Image: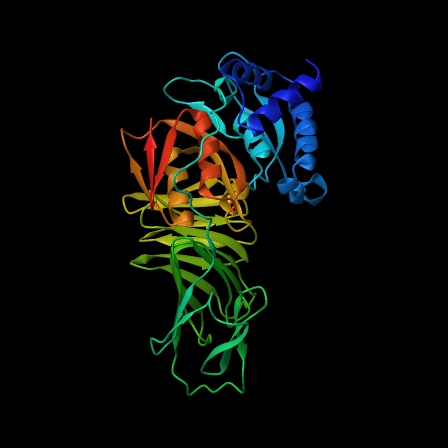
Amino acid sequence: MDSYRITYLLQRYLDDRLTPEEQVELDHILQQDGRAEQMRQVLGTLISQEQDLQEYQEADWDPLFQKIQMQTKAIRPVRYLVRARLIAAAALVLLSIAVWLLVDNRNTGKSLAAVPIPQKQSLTHDLAPGSNKATLTLADNTTIDLDAAKEGVVGQQGNAQLIKDKNGRLSYQPAGEKTSAAPMAYNLLTTPRGGQYQLVLPDGSKVWLNAASRLKYPTSFAGKERVVELQGEAYFEIARNPSMPFKVSLMGQPSAQVEVLGTHFNVKAYADEPAIQTTLLEGAVKVHQGAGSALLQPGQQARWSSSTNIKVLTADLEETIAWKNGLFKFNEATIEDVMRQLSRWYDVDIVYVNGIPGDLFRGEMYRSVNVSKVLKILEASGVHFTVEGKKILVKN
């Protein structure tokens, strides 16, 4: 089939004028091997001709591509290269629906290539993605709305000035000579659902705090160790100081602690997750849980819960820190795994109308898109979604 026919069908799709027969024809084309590059070229041409999509021309797109593997029982895995930037452009959403997500369906075994493209439909409600927002609680219980605060000094704690820089990051900078007589004071940084924030601790360590998380830390470090408390998820890059080890305690779990022997690691400790995860990217960390402990090497993940001992697994590092890099990334994730992330990022509750679907998902996309874009892609698996106010209804 020549590119003229493909162009015609895609333009009809963008104009929402596909007939049922043309929809079947387009589905068939997308299932054929070797069509991905041709589709991308045609979509690029169409996008360049759309006045309201010109800001997404290829020269401006992020140079991010992804390899998507779709498996069936009959054929070997097929890899596709597709654009991950799905911001607002209906043409990109179309291509993504064809080749982006589904790995397998436990109940039917069908691959995404066998799933027809959903007809375009508008959602009654849509939800914007999360953004940089957090509340800072000072030692005297005064609170500061950081996303509303202006750039510059937002407060002072002991010998440290609290600075919000031009990128919206909070840092603690010395404001005078340190005095040992000052009592230890603590601050609490809290992100809501739909929020995230970056922080530079008094020792220069960097922290990225994910949505629905809390980090408690001293306004200056003193003594033999540096200890912070976490609830939720955070990525750490720790400033080296062998004479003062860094430790992460988990709020509400006094027997659980991450002892930092290296630098870069991620801790995921949400109450609604089935397990706590500590993943090491660089250096070394030692995880403690009750009487048990485990020493991690780069590329490893420790996983445990209140009813299980620590297990050390090989980690998918890209998936682990995707949130920090502005992405959703799933590697054979269940629908529950996916929806927990959406719930936190879009500040929405999840309701399973008639049971929990058994699909597994693999793929990635930017977190900067509205929830309707994510849900439209997920619907290629045969699962359906309805947004009602601050709820997402999941239907088999």
Q: Quadrant of the C terminus?
A: top left
Closer to the camera, 380 or 246? Answer: 380
Q: In this view, does 194 lie above or below 177?
A: above
Q: In the image, 8: left or right of 124? A: right
The residue lying at 52 percent from left, 13 percent from top is 21
Among the 4 quarters of the image, the one containing residue 138: bottom left
Q: Is residue 387 above or below residue 81?
A: below
Residue furthest right as drawn: 59
Among the 4 quarters of the image, the one containing residue 165: bottom right
Task: Name the spot of residue 199 as percent of width and height, x first.
Answer: 50, 65
Q: In the image, 168: left or right of 218? A: right
Task: Name the spot of residue 13 as percent of width and height, x first.
Answer: 56, 25
Residue 79 in view (yes/no): no
State the scheme by which the image is colored: rainbow
Q: Quadrant of the N terminus?
A: top right
Q: In the image, 51: left or right of 234? A: right
Task: Name the spot of residue 256 as percent of width and height, x first.
Answer: 34, 55
Residue 19 in view (yes/no): yes
The residue lying at 66 percent from left, 23 percent from top is 7
Report the number of numbered marks: 0
The residue lying at 55 percent from left, 41 percent from top is 88
Task: Name the spot of residue 316 as percent of width and height, x first.
Answer: 52, 40
Q: Is residue 227 above or below residue 57?
A: below
Closer to the camera, 109 or 241? Answer: 109
